[in-house]
Image (tube, helix red, strand yellow):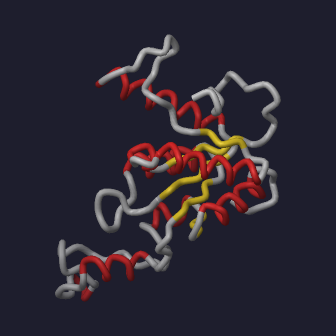
Amino acid sequence: MSSFFEPGIPEPGISEPGIYLAGPTVFFREAESAFAALAQLCRARHLHPVQPAEPVDADGQVLQGAAAARHLFVQNTLRIRAAAGVLADLRPFRGELEPDSGTVFEVGFAHALGKPVAAVLADTRDWGARVRSVCGTGEPGPAGLEMDGRYDMLIEDFGGPLNLMLSESCHVFHDAASALDWLAAATRGGAGR
């Protein structure tokens, strides 16, 4: 898309920090309007929105299958490398609890690169409470540990709003505006990572 930069090919006049927009938004019917709203929020904070790649090669040909998958992986990881930070939509995806696994990868990848990551999660109750609300509680497990009632698995409860690996690798906010406020400070050296 012409309104978003290609990594390694800076747009003329773009000096704002680039923020990669990670999340399942690309799968939604309203993807175009959702990205436009995020772009507006970014620009209001002097941040440059970086949308995930399209499955289109340099000649404008729409890619399919394995070629599309490889192109998207390469382009999106390049965009994350080139961005100053990541805004990640970690809402539950195709289920009641877990976020989109591709977005989770992008969060981990950005964290490993030392990029600030701000996550958006409307339900910011702690992870244990969220698991209990969806799965219930079951019979105690080994050593009396709390197990869920749906899958009979240990309920992780460290107080964070997501699985501990996500809770520890990003800052979680209730809405995109707050997350972008934090990213604006973080990409300019004003917020802790």
Q: Residue at x 74, y 26 (%)?
A: 11
User: Residue 85 location, x and y as percent?
Assistant: 66, 47
Q: Quadrant of the N terminus?
A: top right
Q: Nearer the viewer, residue 163 or 180?
A: 180
Q: Residue at x 45, y 22 (%)?
A: 56
Residue 193 against residue 157 in the figure, above or below: above
Q: Residue 156 lies in what quarter of the image?
A: bottom left
Q: Residue 72 lies in what quarter of the image?
A: top left
Residue 170 against residue 129 in the figure, above or below: above
Marks counted in the figure total 0
In-image side of 184 versus 54 (left or right): right
User: Residue 88 location, x and y as percent?
Assistant: 53, 54
Q: Residue 179 lies in what quarter of the image?
A: bottom right
Q: Nearer the viewer, residue 89 or 113?
A: 89
Q: Quadrant of the C terminus?
A: bottom right
User: Residue 185 location, x and y as percent?
Assistant: 78, 58
In-image side of 74 versus 97 (left or right): right
User: Residue 176 location, x and y as percent?
Assistant: 61, 61
Q: Residue at x 59, y 52 (%)?
A: 87
In-image side of 145 versus 30 (left or right): left
Residue 81 against residue 155 in the figure, above or below: above
Q: Nearer the viewer, residue 121 or 116?
A: 121
Q: Residue at x 50, y 75 (%)?
A: 124
In-image side of 144 versus 5 (left or right): left
